[in-house]
Amino acid sequence: MRSKLFQVALLIIALAWMVQLGLIAAENPVAAWQGSGSDDSKYVGLWAGSYSADNGHTDKLSYTLSKDDKGQWRGTVKYTDKNEEQTADFTSLQIADGKMKGKIDSPDGQVEITIEGQFEGEIFEGTYVISPKGSTEVVVKGTWKVAKTAAAKTGQ
């Protein structure tokens, strides 16, 4: 009889613990889905370097990555094109398991740039593809490589 009471008590405690975890996840589903997020801090900051198009054009590139108070990734891309500095916000951005996938629109809104990359410590590199907005046709493609800047490393 004691053994059965002990088993029932143990089951009740386990169920109560599971309900409590479920309530915590319901209050903050983004945190529950993304984990603690403490590992994400290594991706936050300014990353600067360059890009190279398949047609031979090479120029400056930087990413500024952050997370908002809801746990969503945000970012800005700065790049030099035709001797002019351009700035664009990511229209979509996902960072998980050391990989990044995002999209930006050109300043005139005519093309979409799909960016993919992988973090390797202080280096972040990948590829990009430029397509007319709403099309899968590839107009230009290339590679890029950036490194975390000193200001980003020190939290300035």
Image (cartoon, helix red, strand yellow):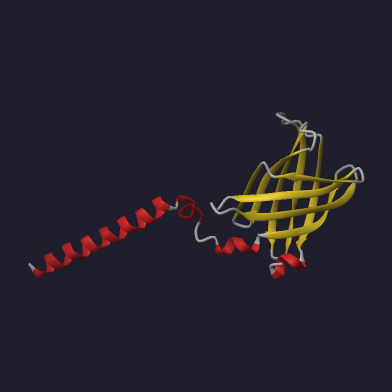
Residue appearing at x 61%, y 51% in the figure: 73
Quadrant of image for the N terminus: bottom left
Residue 132 is situated, as x and y percent measured from the top left of the image, at 77, 31
- Residue 148 falls in image quadrant: bottom right
In percent of width and height, residue 117 lies at 70, 52
- Specify whether 28 is left or right of 118: left
The residue lying furthest to the top in this view is 134
Q: Count of labels shown?
A: 0
The structure residue drawn at horizontal position 30% and vertical position 61%, both measured from the top left corner, is: 17
Counting from the top left corner in percent of width and height, residue 113 is at 75, 40
In the rendered view, tell whether residue 9 sits above or below residue 30. Answer: below
Q: Is residue 54 left or right of residue 148?
A: right
Depth order, front residue of 65/136: 65
Quadrant, the C terminus? bottom right
Q: For the point 72% across and 65% down, which residue is it? A: 152
Residue at 55% across / 54% down in the picture? 69
Q: Quadrant of residue 47?
A: bottom right
Image coordinates of residue 6 in percent, x first then y, are 16, 68
